[in-house]
Amino acid sequence: MNTDLRQDIEALTDAVKRFTLERIAPHVAGWDEAGEFPRELYREAAALGVLGLGYPEALGGTPAPFALRNAVSSTMSRYGGSGGIMAGLFSLNIGLPPVLRYASEAVQSEVIPPVLRGERIAALAITEPGGGSDVASLRTAGRRDGDDWVINGEKVFITSGMRADWITMAVRTGEAGSKGASGISMILVPGDSAGLSRSALDKMGWWCSDTAHLRMDNVRVPHRFLLGEEGGGFRIIMSNFNGERLGMSAMALGFAQACFDEALDWARQRKTFGAALVERQVIRHKLVDMQMRIASTQAWLDVVTARVDAGDQGPEWVAQVCMLKNHATQSMQFCADQAVQILGGMGFMRGTRSERIYREVKVMMIGGGAEEIMKDLAARQLGI
């Protein structure tokens, strides 16, 4: 990493830390109980510059390497301690990349700048009832009717699905009854489309992030919102997953650090039998075990990030991303478990970061590709 990039990362993460401690951390528990965070937070994050990282200046963004973007994600996760905030606030980073890469310039100019300003919300809709990681089996259908696509079907577990103004949706546009990957297309669906209905879902974690079940009943979408070529959606989806998994690894690292921070602070303050917990060897060993996993995750993330920033996205790199995502979320799970144990009764109480992260770790191990899928994909990429 060169000196200029290192300085940029230090300056931006310092600003992000201050913003998160002032505008997010004090309110997370209340937003969790309310089941949402204010839409104004999108505008505030946009003003800070974090929503536009990685997008072209011409569209209102700031070109940035993954090293900078991942550092921001880890920092906000560490000091905010809320997966719900991260999932909702940054759903644009899974919804917009296909628009940026495959939409016409006119559609990009219409859609992307308002999202980067925090005025609109973007989401991604792939998963369907009865089918998660098996993307090739999706059944939501789109047929061409003049200058429109007519879409019928359902999507489920859609992050930001209740509030999204733009939904990047995987749709089967092949012949009726077609199967497999070849008949899948990506279509950008306006959130105010007639025939689109939404139902909120209750979750074990990510309470303040709205998650929806979407139903499409003869939803008409202009043909110009087709992303890329008809039938080319599967390749778009697979490429998009790599960025999502790398971003989730950075978030998991931040959450693991948040658990360590809270556990260490508690261990220094809490006294039992006349001595602080941190003076107990068994507690110090737990804290060291947490640091071991945090350090290994940070090192692995740095290496994988440096490779993609250098232009390496080959099969072996994809395998590394899959394995990193598993390792990072397992580190997060371990640290959350150890932190709750160290906090004892307080770790079981709502409002602590460790309790929240303990509830949220499972979705991190499932979302973007479950552990089992990650292992199988990595094995195929490595020729095992």
Image (tube, helix red, strand yellow):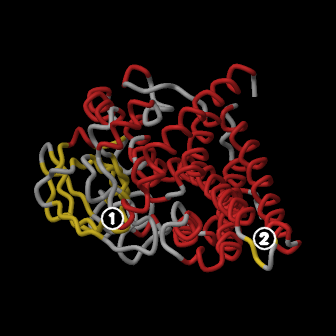
Position of residue 119 relative to residue 361, above or below, is: above
Could you tell whether 320 is left or right of 210 in the image? right
Residue 70 percent across, percent down from the top left = 61, 42
Residue 379 percent across, percent down from the top left = 72, 64
Which residue occupies the foreground of this view, 366 or 294?
294
The crowd level at tag 2 (other Cα within 10 Å; few <14, some 14-19, many 20+) is many
The quarter of the rendered structure image containing the N terminus is top right
Please tell me which residue is depicted at 26% across the width and 63% down the height of the picture.
Answer: 141
Q: Which mark is residue 180?
A: none
The crowd level at tag 1 (other Cα within 10 Å; few <14, some 14-19, many 20+) is some
Rounded to the nearest whole Å, what is the CA distance between mark 1 and mark 2? 35 Å
Position of residue 16 relative to residue 337, above or below, is: above
Residue at the extreme front of the image, as rendered: 274
Give amino acid for label 2. Answer: Leu
- Kindly report which numbered mark, 1 or 2, lies closer to the viewer in this rendering: 2
Could you tell whether 382 is left or right of 257 in the image? right
Could you tell whether 12 is left or right of 168 in the image? right
Please tell me which residue is depicted at 39% across the width and 64% down the height of the picture.
Answer: 32
Reading the image, the residue beneath label 1 is 35
Locate residue 381: give its quadrant. Answer: bottom right
Residues at circles 1 and 2 in contact by the CB criterion of under 8 Å: no
Reading the image, the residue beneath label 2 is 277
Which residue occupies the foreground of this view, 266 or 303?
266
Give amino acid for label 1. Answer: Gly
Residue 69 percent across, percent down from the top left = 57, 37
Who comes first in sequence, dot 1 or dot 2?
1
Is residue 104 at all visible to an observer of this figure? Answer: yes
Q: Secondary structure at mark 2?
A: helix
